[in-house]
Image: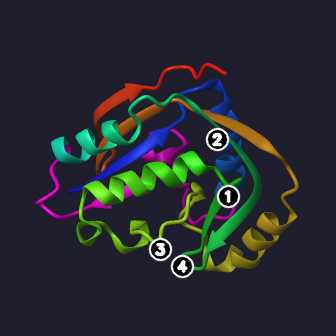
Amino acid sequence: MALAINIRSDDPSAKQIEALWDEVAAFESQPSMRALAYRPHFTFAIYDAPEVTAEIAWETMLRAVEGEGQLLVAFKRIRWFAGPPLVLWAEPEFDDTLVRWHASISAAIDPAFCRPHYRPGNWRPHCTLGTQTADAKRDDAIAFAQSFNGSISVMFDVVDCVSFPPVRVVAEQRLPVRVP
């Protein structure tokens, strides 16, 4: 069983990402994101190594966000990982906070224990929209991504540690509202 540390959105603004999940599901062999029964999120690290326990991962996440608050993230583009299968995701505008938190986590837990896509130099902040694009709908999915000209902002307000599959929250903490 794997462990992941994330920031997720339990805020009403997450409905904007969930609406994109539903649009992207039309390109999938089976709808992937609603099936997770888990909210829109950014994953900072995934660990399969027994050396990284839930307690270690959770304490690392808490240290990374210590003194921090909720994070409003803007998205203006939809991108894809080639796969297979093709994965569609919402690209956040650059946010130093996400990068700083990832760096803190990577400095605290040896990245060799982390899945390769989440290691420093490989990690790309993204909010997944669909993971099961059907081969026959690949071109349509890419056209959808390229045609997206929206702009949405989502408040990410909870950090957590989950085990999967299936997704089970091991620990979570709501982030305080940021004071301007």
Mark 1, residue position: 91
Q: Amino acid at mark 3?
A: Gly
From which residue to which does the magenta span run?
Answer: 26-54
Q: Element under label 2?
A: helix
Crowding at dot 3, Cα within 10 Å, few <14 / some 14-19 / many 20+, comes out as: few
Q: Which quadrant is home to the N terminus? A: bottom left
Badge 2 amino acid: Glu
The local crowd at label 1, few if under 14, some if 14 to 19, many if 20 or more residues have their Cα within 10 Å, is some
Residue 135, given in percent of the width and then of the height, sits at 62, 79
Horizontal and vertical percent for residue 178?
Answer: 58, 23
Label 3, label 1: how far apart the Cα atoms are = 17 Å
Which of the two marks, 3 or 1, is nearer to us in this view? 3
Let me know if residue 171 is in the magenta part: no
Residue that label 2 marks: 18
Cα distance in 3D space between marks 1 and 2: 15 Å
Question: Which residue is under mark 4?
Answer: 83
The C terminus lies in which quarter of the figure?
A: top right
3D distance between C-alphas at marks 3 and 4: 19 Å
Circle on res. 121: 3
Determine the residue positioned at 33% across, 69% down.
115
Are discs 1 and 4 less than 8 Å apart at CB?
A: no
- Determine whether, in the image, residue 38 is placed left or right of residue 50: right
Q: Image height check: is 11 above or below 166?
A: above
For mark 4, give the secondary structure. Answer: loop
Earlier sequence position, callout 3 versus callout 1: 1
The mark nearer the N terminus, 3 or 2, is: 2
